Image (spheres, grey):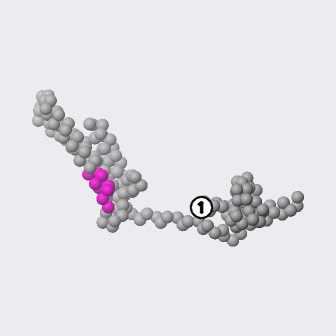
Amino acid sequence: MIIWEAALAAIGLYLLIGGRLSLMGRELQGRRARRIGLVLVAPLTVALLLALAISAALDGEAVSDSAAIALTALEIALVAAALAGAALLFGRENRAGSLFWRGDPPPPPPPEPSPLPGPGHMTVAEAGRILHLRDLEVLALIRAGTLTGVRAGSSYHVERRSVDRLRLKRKDR
C-alpha cells in the first residue's frame, strides 16, 4: 500500500510545484491543479501521522492481526478517497465554464490554408492542363524538384514560373 501512497504523493508534489495538469486532452492550471496535488499527497501524510500516533500509543508492543487488517483497510479507503476526490476536482468545470482556471484562454486554432492558389501560383490540375499531364504526374514532378510547389493543407500550389520554365524546356526539344 505504501507504493500507491508514495506514487500519489509524488504526483501530488509535482502538481503542487508545477501547478499544471494535462490529462486526456484537458489542461488545468493554477489553483485547481494544486488542490488536486494536495488531495493526492493526503493519504501518505495521514498514514505517516497515524503510524506515529499508534507507535507512540503502543510503546513498543506489537499490533494485533485484527488491528493491522483494520489499518490496511483504512489506508485503502484513504487512497480510494484521494483518487475519487482528484477525479472529482479534475472533472468539474470552474465558474467560467472553462478547464483553464487561471491564465490565458487557449489560443485560437490556426487559420486553414486557402484552397485557392495565391498570385503567382496555380493548382495541380491547372498545371496539368498547361503541361498536358495528369495530376499524379504533376505531383511526381513536384516531389522530384522539377516543379516548385507549396503544400496548402491537403493540396499543392504550383509556382507559375516553374510551370512556364518546364513548358519552354519541352518546346525546345
**5 vs 141: above or below:** above
Image-based side of 115 in relation to 53, left or right: right
Left or right: residue 79 compared with residue 160? left
Q: Could you tell me which residue is drawn at 68 percent across and 65 percent down?
A: 123
Q: Which residues are magenta?
A: 85-93
Residue placed most toward the observer, 135 or 45: 135
| Closer-to-camera residue (99/139) | 139
Q: Is 107 placed left or right of 152 in the picture?
A: left
The main secondary structure of the magenta stretch is: helix
- Residue at 34 percent across and 51 percent down: it is 15
Where, quadrant-wise, is the C terminus in this rendering? bottom right
Q: Position of residue 26 (x, y in %)?
A: 39, 56
State the SS at label 1. loop
Instruction: Let me know if residue 39 appears in the view.
Output: no
Res. 93 image quadrant? bottom left
* Image location (x, y in percent) of residue 164: 79, 65
Q: Quadrant of the N terminus?
A: top left
Q: Is residue 134 magenta?
A: no
Labels in figure, total: 1
For badge 1, the amino acid type reads Gly
Q: Is residue 38 left or right of residue 70?
A: right
Question: From this viewpoint, is residue 117 visible?
Answer: yes
Between 88 and 101, the one lying in front of the other is 88
Q: Quadrant of residue 31?
A: bottom left
Pointer 1 residue: 153
The image shows residue 154 at horizontal and vertical percentages of 60, 60
